[in-house]
């Protein structure tokens, strides 16, 4: 698999060594924050965590193609690395895990349901594909106002493509040739239901044909390839070329969440078989082979990232929960007079 | 009511809604209308007739036939700074959009702790008495009024239509705007000229009286007023409150009236079980039990899935003005 990444060469994608190193760092940061969530849960410190181990290549590549301050991201709950990649602070991730009052959403939502108007990350619920029409609406607003050079990136898993709202969203965006990219992070599993029980088509991008938009499949374990594809289709969207469906393949290495036990529906052997797709060791090896970093650099980077994760963990844990009275705020604008 | 001009014009509810939408589109370029057949067809009741020529297909959007995305796309527009007015062609078609309204629009501000908001209006015609059968006659308010984060408005007079629609469009939160389709052309009334709003959450005493309070909304407000006038000629005095807003609900006006008349009758077209009347009667029982001289009564649609297409079945479902008058007399004599 690694060989595919070597062709074409790194420099053909226009990525500087700094950006390549940034990608690796983002992937490591996500992996360690992910693991931290599961650790904190097993320690009894947080009630719930969700992980995106295996998605790091997609997130690093897509984040780099996203234009900060211009584009809008409408992610789903397995996009921690993508959100980090466009500017979310690791502390914000920990605040969301610990449900602290200082979190932008005030500790109301599950971890990894970020909101950040500051960064252009639209608030989402946990309902699969319910965010897709919101992404389309945001893209419509951009087009109506003539906001040149902006686009919406809407991401979701393979399971989302079974939802009616997903199909309605792609169709609406296609009819109006909206500036939007639909990014499917196909990790093969919708909790316990494998892709073959979700759809008959072999490739999710086949669904694009039904709506008359292009579909592009990319190896999501390869952040450079993801960046290349996402840059192209986001540029196309930003310049009036309309929507694209991108399928980035990956594998979900962890259980769906800390409340799930994947031993009930898949074998350990299957997971091990997919370990050769693990984007992090692969990308690290390639950067070393190309002389972008040394093995010593890689070791130091891991130490630095872990230290940062430890620091923000302590910092977030020390902060308070929201006050109980916060329950009553922001139901409506202004004072809500509850019907007591 | 903040009225900018003393001039007024007589019009029906269709015209009131139409003129209000037209003004909003003219005055605020962030507003747009999206829904099924709102463009070239001008909406099935001709409310948006000609709008597409004046404002263009970008702002008068004939959407694909898919209600979840009509509301869902409108939510995204609202989150990104537009002021969308979504239309569900008939309230009966709103069910596919339930997730978007209840799970998304109503919770956008709350789940993001105010980081994102959803200033969205969803207009839809509801109600029966027009031979609309099972899927063009329903009342949907009880399915939504349980949900904090939503506002629900159901005006029945042209002046209220205008004032409350303006308020809904200005509102920073999602508003479900229910228009009783039988009142569209049946009801005419004076509508003040110029821009004005009526606060969401304020009921209106449409017929003053002191022996019985009747709370209603929609088509039945008009019949209740007719019945109250009839009882007036018989020497009985009935106060009719037009609820206008279902959520938030004006408990102050209801309680003040009940404390005065000491009797309460709630009339609505939606069925009784879990209906809006259940909440009103529970609230009055909690707040004003010792002020009551008679049991609270509810006159509501029957406990069946919908009104039938056959005239006999529809008539059996709908409450006649005679039945309203009978219930009023009975309660006054209690």
Image: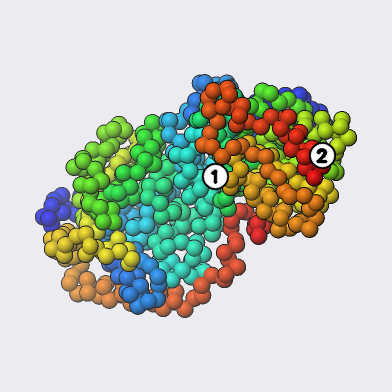
Kindly identify the residue that appears in the image at 31 percent across and 44 percent down. Answer: A161
Q: Quadrant of the C terminus of chain A?
A: bottom right
- The quarter of the picture where residue B228 lies is top right
Q: Position of residue B330 (x, y in %)?
A: 77, 40
Q: With A52 as the anchor, is A133 left or right in this view?
A: right
Judged left or right of residue B55, residue B196 is right
The chain containing the residue under callout 2 comes to B
> Does the image show residue A281?
yes
Find residue B168 and report its horizontal and vertical position in percent. 64, 41
Decide which of A150, B211 is in the foreground and name it.
Answer: B211
Residue B128's place in the image compared with A314, above or below, is above
Query: How many numbered discs, if any?
Result: 2
Tag 1 secondary structure? helix
- Element type at mark 2: strand
Q: Which mark is residue B143?
A: 1
Give the residue displayed 31% in from the left and 39% down from the top: A244
- Residue A175 tag number: none
Question: Badge 1: how crowded within 10 Å, few (<14), some, or many (20+)?
Answer: some
Q: Who's the residue at 58% across and 24% down the image?
A: B312
Q: How is the image coloured?
A: rainbow
Report the chain holding disc 1.
Answer: B
In the rendered image of this protein, does residue B185 appear above or below residue A154?
above
User: Seen in the image, is A211 located left or right of residue B132?
Assistant: left
Residue A171 position, x and y percent, is 36, 34
Q: Toward the viewer: A143 or B317? A: B317
Which numbered disc covers residue B238? 2
Q: Is residue A253 visible to us here? A: no
Residue at horizontal 22 percent and vertical 52 percent from the top: A194
Which of disc 2 and disc 1 is earlier in sequence?
1
What is the C-alpha distance between the residues marked 1 and 2? 30 Å
């Amino acid at each position: 698999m690694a060989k595919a990444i070597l062709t074409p060469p790194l420099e053909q994608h226009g990525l500087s060594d700094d950006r390549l190193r940034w990608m690796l760092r983002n992937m490591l940061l996500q992996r360690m924050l992910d693991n931290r969530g599961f650790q904190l849960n097993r320690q009894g410190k947080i009630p719930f965590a969700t992980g995106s181990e295996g998605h790091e290549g997609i997130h690093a590549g897509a984040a780099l193609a996203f234009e900060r301050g211009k584009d809008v991201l409408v992610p789903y709950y397995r996009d921690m690395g993508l959100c980090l990649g466009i500017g979310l602070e690791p502390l914000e991730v920990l605040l969301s895990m610990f449900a602290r009052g200082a979190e932008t959403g005030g500790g109301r939502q599950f971890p990894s349901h970020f909101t950040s108007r500051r960064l252009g990350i639209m608030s989402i619920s946990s309902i699969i594909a319910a965010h897709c029409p919101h992404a389309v609406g945001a893209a419509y607003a951009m087009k109506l106002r003539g906001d040149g050079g902006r686009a919406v990136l809407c991401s979701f898993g393979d399971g989302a493509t079974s939802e009616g709202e997903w199909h309605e969203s792609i169709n609406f965006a296609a009819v109006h040739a909206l500036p939007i990219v639909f990014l499917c992070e196909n990790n093969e599993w919708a909790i316990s239901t494998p892709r073959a029980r979700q759809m008959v088509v072999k490739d999710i991008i086949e669904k694009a044909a039904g709506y008359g938009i292009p579909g592009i499949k990319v190896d999501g374990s390869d952040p450079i390839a993801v960046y290349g594809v996402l840059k192209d289709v986001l540029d196309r969207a930003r310049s009036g070329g309309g929507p694209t469906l991108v399928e980035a393949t990956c594998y979900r290495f962890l259980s769906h969440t800390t409340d799930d036990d994947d031993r009930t529906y898949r074998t350990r052997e299957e997971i091990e078989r997919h370990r050769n797709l693990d984007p992090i060791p692969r990308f690290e090896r390639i950067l070393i082979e190309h002389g972008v970093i040394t093995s010593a650099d890689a070791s130091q980077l891991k130490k630095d990232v872990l230290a940062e994760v430890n620091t923000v963990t302590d910092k977030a844990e020390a902060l308070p929960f929201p006050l109980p009275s916060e329950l009553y705020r922001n139901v409506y604008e202004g004072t809500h007079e509850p019907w007591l | 009511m903040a009225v900018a001009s003393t001039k007024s014009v007589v019009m029906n509810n269709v015209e009131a809604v139409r003129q209000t939408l037209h003004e909003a589109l003219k005055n605020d370029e962030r507003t747009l209308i999206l829904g099924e057949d709102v463009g070239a067809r001008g909406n099935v009741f001709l409310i948006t007739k000609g709008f597409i020529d004046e404002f263009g297909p970008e702002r008068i959007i004939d959407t694909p036939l898919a209600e979840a995305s009509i509301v869902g796309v409108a939510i995204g527009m609202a989150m990104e700074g537009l002021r969308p007015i979504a239309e569900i062609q008939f309230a009966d078609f709103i069910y596919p959009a339930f997730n978007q309204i209840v799970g998304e629009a109503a919770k956008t501000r709350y789940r993001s702790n105010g980081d994102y908001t959803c200033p969205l209006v969803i207009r839809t015609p509801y109600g029966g008495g027009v031979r609309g059968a099972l899927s063009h006659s329903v009342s949907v308010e009880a399915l939504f009024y349980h949900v904090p984060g939503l506002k629900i408005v159901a005006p029945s007079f042209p002046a209220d239509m205008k004032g409350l629609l303006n308020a809904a469009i200005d509102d920073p939160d999602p508003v479900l705007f229910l228009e009783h389709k039988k009142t569209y052309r049946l009801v005419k009334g004076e509508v003040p000229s110029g821009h004005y709003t009526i606060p969401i959450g304020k009921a209106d005493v449409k017929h003053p009286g002191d022996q019985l309070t009747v709370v209603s909304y929609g088509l039945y407000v008009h019949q209740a007023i007719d019945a109250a006038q009839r009882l007036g000629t018989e020497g009985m005095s009935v106060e009719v409150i037009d609820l206008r807003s279902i959520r938030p609900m004006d408990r102050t006006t209801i309680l003040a009236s009940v404390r005065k008349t000491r009797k309460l009758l709630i009339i609505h077209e939606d069925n009784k079980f879990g209906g809006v009347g259940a909440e009103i009667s529970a609230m009055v029982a909690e707040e004003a039990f010792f002020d009551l001289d008679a049991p609270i009564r509810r006159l509501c649609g029957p406990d069946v899935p919908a009104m039938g297409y056959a005239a006999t079945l529809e008539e059996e479902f709908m409450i006649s003005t005679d039945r309203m008058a009978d219930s009023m007399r009975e309660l006054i004599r209690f």
